[in-house]
Amino acid sequence: MAESHKKKAKESEAPKKKPAAAKPAPRKKKEVKEVVKEAVKEVKAAKAEATVEKPAVVAHAAPPPPPAPVHHAAKPKKAKSTAPKYYGTGRRKEAIAKVWITPGTGKITVNDRPYGEYFCGRKLLENYINRPLVATQNTGKFDVMAEVFGGGVPGQATAVSLGIARALVELNHDLKTTLKRQGLMTRDPRMRERKKYGRKRARRAFQYTKR
């Protein structure tokens, strides 16, 4: 009797187990795949509907009238001079002068400017340029057009002088003797001596202090 009472007491103390809930029957793999495919199709269809834009109704306006034709006035063409040109190249130090002479009234231009303006009214440099014309007695008979670059202003003036002398020889070879006697056909070879390494200039040494 005592044992039976003990068993009943243990059974009453032990927690009562809840009845197990009925588990849903597992789906087959084919059914799961079909469900996933349908869900993917629904998502794609929803995205497509969201991205499709309805065509906006555009009111076609009347085309603008064509612009009136613009008539540009024709620029007057410069008359090409048929007078012969004679060319000479002059050099001095680092300056180079391209010189053309044509029969004219004695107008001298350097880089499209009057030579008096270009050389700032320096009479000595103007005399350099006029020397070949004065020596051959051609003052006021030719127009001179010079294009100069490089070097300094005095070197450019001497280069123009040599260019005029060479152009005059192209015009008349008999003038060469007269120009040569005046020393106007000789290219002045004097130039600045180059700097040497170990020196401040061509020959000047660096300053030396003993103490």
Image (cartoon, helix red, strand yellow):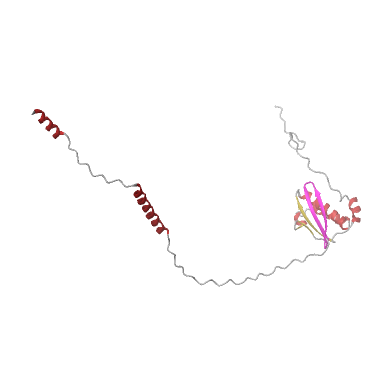
Residue at the limit of the structure toward the top, as seen here: 211
Q: Nearer the viewer, residue 100 or 199?
A: 100
Kindly indicate the quadrant of the structure image that contains residue 75: bottom right
Q: Is residue 92 magenta?
A: yes
Q: Nearer the viewer, residue 124 or 53?
A: 53
- Residue 192 in picture, x, y percent from top left: 78, 42
Q: In this orientation, which residue lies closer to the viewer: 45 or 207?
A: 45
Q: Is residue 29 left or right of residue 72?
A: left
Left or right? Give the position of 186 relative to 41: right
Residue at image location 76% in from the left, 53% down from the top: 148
Query: Can you tell which quarter of the image residue 117 is in?
Result: bottom right
Q: For residue 22: magenta? A: no
Tell me the quadrant of the picture where the N terminus can be found.
top left
- Is 179 situated left or right of 209 in this image? right
| Residue furthest out toward the left | 1
Q: Position of residue 14 (x, y in %)?
A: 16, 34
Q: Is residue 63 above or below residue 1?
A: below
- Chain part drawn in magenta: 85-105
Does the image show residue 154?
no
User: Where is residue 205 drawn, in percent x and y?
Assistant: 75, 34
Magenta-drawn stretch, dominant element (helix, strand or loop): strand
Residue 102 visible in image: yes
Residue 57 in percent (x, y) is at 44, 67
Q: Is residue 196 left or right of residue 17?
A: right
Figure quadrant of the C terminus: top right
